[in-house]
Image: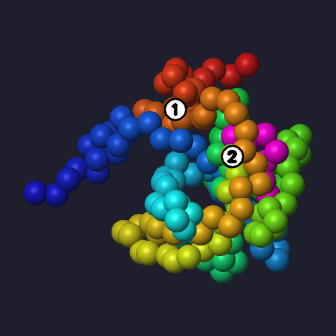
Amino acid sequence: MPVDAREYAAALRQYAAGVVLLTVRDDIDDVGTTVTSLMSVSADPPLVAIGLAAEGYPAEVLQAVGSCAVNVLASADAILASRFSSAGRPSARHLLESVPWRRGPVSDAIVLDGALAALDCTVASVVEAGDHVVVLLQVEDVPVLGDGDPLLRLRGRFTDGAGQPLRRP
């Protein structure tokens, strides 16, 4: 018996996931998207994996460019995460006009100065997985390592590290 898509989505909404901002710099512009499917794969060598919609522009650009930055967002970054999860968003630089950032030393992608952590990565491999791709990333550098409470996604809402929903200021 096939699994009902709504039940599947409802079940996974019970799982709290950290929120990251994936950024990629290509020849045309900077691309960014909010991602909640990040996992540590290996410490030696340092590898992480992310899931992206296979037909989405971020997956296309990442595969073409071959490098990116993964910015681990703090609980104070909920509005920023929302900006990057909206359809039809403009260039990543326009969404970050008031946010301090720099370029990753390997990827040249946007690295947020205020991130809890930033990983500068190169693409090690890509695996097709249903309507998504799983991208295995080799961590080449850790240009930011901060401190604070992480931004989480739980039950379709951004929450703080204690699972409390975040309210707009």
Q: Quadrant of the N terminus?
A: bottom left
Dot 1 falls on a residue whose secondary structure is strand
Evaluate whether residue 85 shows in this view.
Answer: no
Question: Residue 58 colored magenta?
Answer: no
Q: Amino acid at mark 1?
A: Arg
Say which residue label 1 marks: 157
Q: Which residues are magenta?
A: 110-116
Q: Secondary structure at mark 2?
A: strand
Q: Residue at 70%, 33% (x, y): give it.
A: 147
Q: Horizontal placement of 19 versus 40: left or right?
A: right
Residue 38 position, x and y percent, is 51, 53
Between circles 1 and 2, the one closer to the viewer is 2
Closer to the camera in the image, 160 or 28: 160
Q: Which mark is residue 35?
A: none
Residue with the mark numbered 2: 117
In the depicted structure, whether residue 15 falls above or below residue 89 = above
Instruction: In the rendered view, tell whether residue 150 sits above or below residue 94.
Output: above
Question: Quarter-wise, where is residue 105 in the image?
Answer: bottom right
Which amino acid type is marked by label 2? Ala
